[in-house]
Image (cartoon, rainbow, N blue to C red):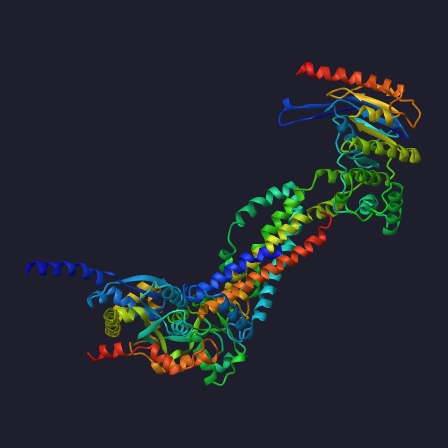
């Protein structure tokens, strides 16, 4: 069973390599898998720009995402719970959300730089914008999805508003909160490259690395960098899924 | 302990005046401590609404509910409720569900654990204390729900068709189980059901409600000593009695359509 | 006889437009005052006067993007920085040759007007922005630091796009920048900065922008390439002799104000002569910092810079 999953992937990679080896695809258009792997090795040992090694880029990027995403979760989850619970609040805030949400994080870059300056704060802000809305909206959905009978059962057990909030709303919304968190993390990680357009002061970051690879005309390292971004995104998501399944044992 | 329902009426209003639904019409009733009262009536007659008013989940349009002569404010007295759909908190284990009320009350961890474990033993749930509701059968889930309610020692226990979702074998078993527990504890129980059999098997007194708007149209004392034989002549007589009344109500309904 | 003559005439009519009907696809960089010869040639019709049709196939924001145009086969000739074209050729993502220089010098290190930075060594502990890694400006900055014995590790070098540099300088995000004209001039006319040193003072006659040509196009259509270079040389002569008109053209194409344009042009040296020695030094720099890997520097430079076209034209 498991072998089938990877069969197609391996086949595609082999065909790809074949096309490149026989020069059917020119090098500058698409690097071959072998070139990408070699580029990856170079990213690890020499780095792009030279001297800036891959693992430093990864750490800086993770740090930026952690900051932007952390703030997003800390704000979105409580706000989502409150918005789910108080219809009045929901009605008041919804229009603002609906207007701001469709604006792509990229469009915020000039403002971000003016507000936060060049550096980690503006990058984290862009990532924050990407992650905030999925977390918020899914949290609200989580509250609204709670079977009202559970709230009534709690009331018959003498629950006050505070009890209902902490003992019913919060745990009952957790599945949806996790969905929102995973989506938010995915968007936040993807926004990373755009976020690092705001100017990277320290000279480290995966998006910055890819842009530099483009400046110095190394398409193989651009692709290797993209591969790294994809793999890390995959790992983070898998990690979150593990935590989720632990927390949602009751499902 | 006496529970009095005085002139309880309830009307639900839709978007405009013409969509008003009269659910209950001047319910007058008195329940003494330790009694097992069954409420039966055609669909939509307001039985559930009545329970919800007593539980404080709904406000009456007219009338009062008095407990020992004092008006019952919404949610201030302990009135326990068992729902047909169990309403167990899916993210809590059996143990955690049962001790939920004690937790809300602020009882300390050790004490509530011990108390809950007693109920688990008494209700035949041993070995399942750390399981989640999705791992339990229907009958077990309802036992957890009942334990969760009874552990609070409520003045009045309300049950809204609690065995409605169970198959008939499990249902009969649960009825016997409930009787056993009730006879040990002596709670005051108001039990709503669709099932005349069930009402006759369990109740001290059966109250029959009319179709909407619900009024009490018959009260039947069931003096048969327990354990009762469902197929006995006395049970059958009472059952026929009630079924006849219900039939009349249903015919009225059909004529109006 | 008449029939053959007619046939020849008709076939010529077919082939002439075919040979000269496809315009040469050229590209240049936006708002970079080094590109002025291209704009002059376009405005004054120098290309048509040399008998060729050109089409502006792209106006790019940055050199690497322009080089991608060559990679994709969308361009025949381009006005572009020596930095992106050298790295592209060295990393084999594009095959171009440099046929003429466009300018030398024409960049400057700028600091805030009110700051007390008087010498390069005052940059220790400060943040200076460069337009990109491996650019000529990056090289110039490091060369300046080296010349003035200022250790590179003690200066924080970060990458910013030139349009963002002035704003960043003003809001104290950076303490200085090095960029190509007209950005240093604009910083001055806006009252935000002053020039600490011009690039010519760091490295006299350093190469900056060049006129490059797709290698295959060069092999197949040498005559057209030559014609374009001739137009280019004419344009540079024009700039030197008709400064006022050249300034007006520069204002039109950069969209910048007259004061900035005038000031910027004072810092740029327009010349068609290829700076081969300068290119060798630059390739050494890229090699040492591992941006490229070229074993035979001389061979590489000789293959990249084709001085023969220019020599022919200047002889005449």
Q: Quadrant of residue C211?
A: bottom left
Q: Is residue B13 above or below residue C172?
A: above
Q: Residue furthest left?
A: C1
Q: Is residue A127 visible?
A: no
**B15 left or right of A41 in image:** right
Location of residue C293 in the rendering, given as x and y in whole percent from the top left corner: 45, 78
Location of residue C280 in the rendering, given as x and y in whole percent from the top left corner: 38, 81
Q: Quadrant of residue B135?
A: top right
Give C268 or A133, whichever is nearer the viewer.
A133
Q: Is residue A198 visible?
A: yes
**A181 left or right of C6 in image:** right
Location of residue A220 in the rendering, given as x and y in whole percent from the top left corner: 48, 68
Give C148 or A27, whichever is nearer the viewer.
A27
Query: What quarter of the picture does the C terminus of chain B occupy?
Result: top right
Location of residue B67 in the rendering, given as x and y in whole percent from the top left corner: 86, 30
**C179 left or right of C46 in image:** right
Query: What quarter of the picture does the N terminus of chain B occupy?
Result: top right
Task: Look at 81% across and 47% down and name the residue there.
Answer: B96
Q: How many marks?
A: 0
Q: Is residue A131 above or below residue C221?
A: above
């Amino acid at each position: 069973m498991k072998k089938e999953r990877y069969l197609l992937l391996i086949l595609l990679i082999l065909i790809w390599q074949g096309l490149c080896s026989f020069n059917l695809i020119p090098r500058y258009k698409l690097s071959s898998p072998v070139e990408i792997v070699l580029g990856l090795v170079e990213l690890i040992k020499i780095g792009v720009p030279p001297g800036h090694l891959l693992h430093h880029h990864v750490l800086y990027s993770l740090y930026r995402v952690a900051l932007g995403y952390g703030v997003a979760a800390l704000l979105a989850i409580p706000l989502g719970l409150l918005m789910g619970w108080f219809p009045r609040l929901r009605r008041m805030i919804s229009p603002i959300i609906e207007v701001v949400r469709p604006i792509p994080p990229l469009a915020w870059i000039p403002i971000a730089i003016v507000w936060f300056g060049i550096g980690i704060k503006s990058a984290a802000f862009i990532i924050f914008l990407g992650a905030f809305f999925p977390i918020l909206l899914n949290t609200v959905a989580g509250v609204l999805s709670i079977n009202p009978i559970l709230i009534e059962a709690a009331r018959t057990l003498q629950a006050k508003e505070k009890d209902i909030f902490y003992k019913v709303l919060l745990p009952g919304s957790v599945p949806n909160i996790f969905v929102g968190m995973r989506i938010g993390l995915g968007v936040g990680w993807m926004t990373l490259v755009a976020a690092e357009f705001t100017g990277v002061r320290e000279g480290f970051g995966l998006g910055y690395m890819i842009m530099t690879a483009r400046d110095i005309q190394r398409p193989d390292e651009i692709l290797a960098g993209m591969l790294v971004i994809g793999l890390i995104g995959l790992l983070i998501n898998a990690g979150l899924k593990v935590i989720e399944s632990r927390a949602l044992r009751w499902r | 302990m006496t529970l009095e329902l005085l002139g309880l009426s309830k009307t639900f209003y839709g978007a405009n005046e013409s969509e008003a639904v009269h659910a209950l019409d001047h319910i007058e009733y008195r329940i003494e401590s330790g009694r097992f009262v069954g409420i039966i009536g055609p669909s939509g007659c307001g039985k559930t609404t009545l329970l919800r008013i007593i539980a404080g989940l709904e406000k009456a349009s007219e009338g009062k509910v008095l407990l020992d002569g004092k008006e019952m404010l919404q949610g201030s007295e302990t009135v326990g409720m068992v729902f047909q759909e169990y309403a167990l908190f899916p993210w809590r284990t059996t143990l955690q569900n049962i001790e939920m009320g004690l937790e809300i009350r602020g009882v300390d961890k050790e004490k509530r654990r011990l108390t809950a474990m007693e109920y688990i033993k008494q209700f035949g749930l041993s070995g399942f204390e750390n399981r989640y509701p999705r791992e339990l059968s229907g009958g077990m889930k309802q036992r957890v729900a009942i334990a969760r309610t009874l552990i609070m020692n409520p003045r009045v226990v309300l049950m809204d068709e609690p065995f409605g979702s169970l198959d008939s074998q499990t249902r009969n078993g649960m009825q016997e189980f409930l009787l056993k527990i009730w006879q040990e504890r002596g709670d005051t129980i108001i039990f709503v059901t669709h099932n005349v059999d069930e009402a006759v098997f369990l109740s001290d007194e059966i109250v029959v409600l009319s179709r909407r708007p619900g009024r009490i149209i018959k009260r039947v004392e069931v003096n048969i000593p327990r354990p009762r034989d469902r197929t006995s002549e006395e049970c059958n007589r009472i059952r026929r009695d009630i079924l006849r009344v219900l039939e009349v109500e249903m015919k009225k309904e059909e004529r109006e359509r | 006889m008449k029939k053959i003559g007619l046939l020849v005439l008709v076939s010529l009519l077919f082939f002439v437009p075919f040979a000269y009907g496809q315009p040469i696809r050229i590209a240049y960089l936006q708002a970079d005052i080094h590109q002025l010869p291209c704009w002059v040639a376009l405005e004054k019709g120098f290309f048509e006067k040399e008998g060729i049709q050109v089409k502006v196939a792209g106006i790019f924001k940055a050199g690497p993007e322009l080089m991608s145009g060559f990679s994709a086969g969308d361009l025949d000739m381009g006005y572009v920085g020596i930095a992106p074209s050298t790295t592209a050729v060295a990393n084999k993502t594009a095959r171009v040759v440099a046929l003429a220089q466009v300018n030398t010098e024409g960049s400057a290190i700028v600091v805030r007007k009110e700051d007390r930075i008087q010498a390069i060594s005052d940059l220790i502990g400060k943040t200076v922005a460069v337009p990109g890694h491996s650019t000529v400006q990056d090289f110039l900055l490091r060369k300046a630091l080296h010349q003035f014995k200022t250790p590179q590790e003690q200066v924080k070098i970060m990458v910013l796009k030139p349009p963002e540099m002035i704003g960043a300088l003003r809001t104290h995000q950076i303490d200085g920048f090095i960029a190509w004209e007209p950005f240093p001039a604009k910083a001055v006319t806006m009252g935000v900065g002053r020039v600490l040193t011009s690039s010519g003072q760091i490295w006299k006659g350093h190469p900056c922008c060049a006129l490059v040509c797709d290698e295959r196009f060069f092999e197949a259509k040498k005559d057209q390439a030559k014609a374009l270079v001739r137009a280019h040389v004419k344009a540079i002569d024009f700039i030197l002799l008709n400064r006022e008109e050249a300034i007006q053209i520069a204002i039109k194409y950069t969209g910048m104000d007259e004061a900035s344009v005038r000031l910027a042009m004072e810092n740029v040296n327009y010349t068609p002569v290829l700076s081969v020695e300068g290119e060798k030094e630059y390739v050494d720099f890229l090699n040492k910092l591992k941006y490229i890997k070229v074993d035979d520097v001389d061979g590489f430079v000789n293959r990249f810079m084709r001085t023969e076209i220019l020599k022919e034209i200047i002889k005449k």
